[in-house]
Amino acid sequence: MRLLDLSLRGFRNYESVQCEFAPGVNLIVGENAQGKTNLLEAICYLSRGAAFRTRREAELIRFGADFSELCARVESYGREQSLRAVMFAGRRPRQLFLSGVKKPSREALDGVLNTVLFCPEDLMILKKGSAERRKLMDDALCQLRPKYARALEEYRRLLAQKAAALHQRMDRPEMLELLPDYNERMAQTGAILITTRAKYLRRLEEQARRHHSAFSGGREELSLCYQTVSTVSDPTASALTVYGQLKEHQQSHHRAELESMQCLSGPHKDDFEAALNGLPMKAFASQGQTRTAAISLKLAERDIFEADTGELPVLLLDDVLSELDPGRKDFVLNQIPGGQVFITCCELETVTEIGKRIRVENGSLYDS
Ligand code: ATP
Ligand code: MG
């Protein structure tokens, strides 16, 4: 999958620019606040039909402009297609086009330009609470497995209903009559979530470990260990086996759930532990190590996407080079295996040997 070119009008700090890209690395260099992240945001918008830094579309339209237009030519599955998005200031809804044909929804763009994005906030995946790590698994699996996306949606709905029933059990005790039904369906959907997450994490570990090792010059071994409901002895077992073990856990926690008025049983607290050479990263990893592992996870995500869809997604790396030593910088700039990569950085002297450099200056782009 490859982005051939991009033109922007009235997007963020870009008035009107056009740029062609290399099939390998595209290094976007410029000082702070010149428009580097904005460029990745535009690519991401065409990929997903949504921005990654804001939910408010109006923020994407250049100050004072009436509309914003993003166009790109993309090559995927051996054919060339064009993507176009137009956003309007005011109430008029945005419009999306695929090869000139207007599409009713974002979903129609799925699979045309897949992207894997690393942004500085992604460092939190390894540093913060479990929600970030569940999101990593859920986001990837929802794109790859429609059955998983449906199970997750149903599980979340059931969880909210069960939480409400437990929470209101004093005022509305009749709601507790629904608990057995919620529990049954949560065990069924929960088993799908757990078995799918466990298998995904195993593949993610295999690929991420390989990248992290190359990235760190063979010095560090990354491991990922899935953590789920305590009665589940083997999360990669059949969904039926895991279902039985989830029921067991529910039964043993029934009283505690009533007392605490909270849902204590199920995969909504799932997590995974990342470790380097056996040491948990959350407690012990340095900044460079954290960054290395976060990028390795993204590279692994890209590999799995390729294995399952047949095309390598475009990799967008925002501000990844800071804190990396020269060897690790060289890995990012010159050794990421295959595919198209966009890397932003502020160090103006940085170069890549396997692609092109684009200089960004106050909303203008220059080949350099
Ligand atoms: P850094 O190196 O600090 O990350 P950057 O090159 O990635 O910088 P961007 O985040 O792309 O910088 O933003 C560049 C500028 O775009 C900001 O100064 C911001 O004020 C401006 N900007 C953001 N939205 C708009 C908009 N809707 N209209 C005009 N300018 C905008
Ligand atoms: Mg930036």
Image (cartoon, rainbow, N blue to C red):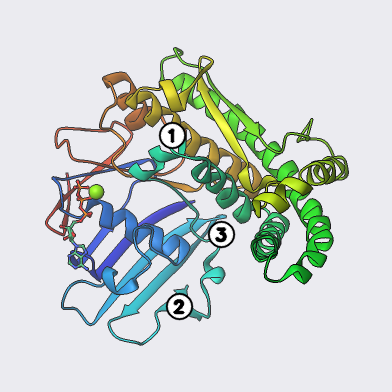
Kind of residue at disc 1: Ala
**Residue 239 drawn at (x, y percent):** 83, 44
**What's the residue at 69%, 60% (across, down)?**
166
Outermost residue on the front side: it is 170
Q: Amino acid at mark 3?
A: Gly
Question: Crowding at label 1, few (<14), some or many (≥20) Cα neighbours within 10 Å?
Answer: many
Residue where numbered disc 2 is placed: 100
Instruction: For marks 1 and 2, give the CA distance.
Output: 37 Å
The 10 Å Cα crowd at callout 3, few under 14, some 14 to 19, many 20 or more, is some
298 is higher (above) or lower (below) than 92: above
Q: Position of residue 317 (x, y in %)?
A: 36, 43
Q: Quadrant of residue 20?
A: bottom left
Residue closest to the eye, 115 or 355: 115
Q: Nearer the viewer, mark 1 or mark 2?
A: 1
- Residues under labels 1 and 3: Cα distance? 24 Å
Describe residue 129's horizontal placement relative to residue 226 as left or right. Answer: left
Ligand 1 closer than 8 Å to label 3 CB: no
Residue 111's disc is: 3
Of labels 1 and 3, earlier in sequence is: 3
The one nearer the camera, 292 or 45, is 292
Q: Which mark is residue 294?
A: 1
Compared to residue 161, the image places residue 2 above or below, namely above
The disc placed on residue 170 is: none
Residue 238, horizontal then vertical, whole percent: 85, 40
Q: Secondary structure at mark 1?
A: helix
- State which quarter of the image contains the C terminus: top left
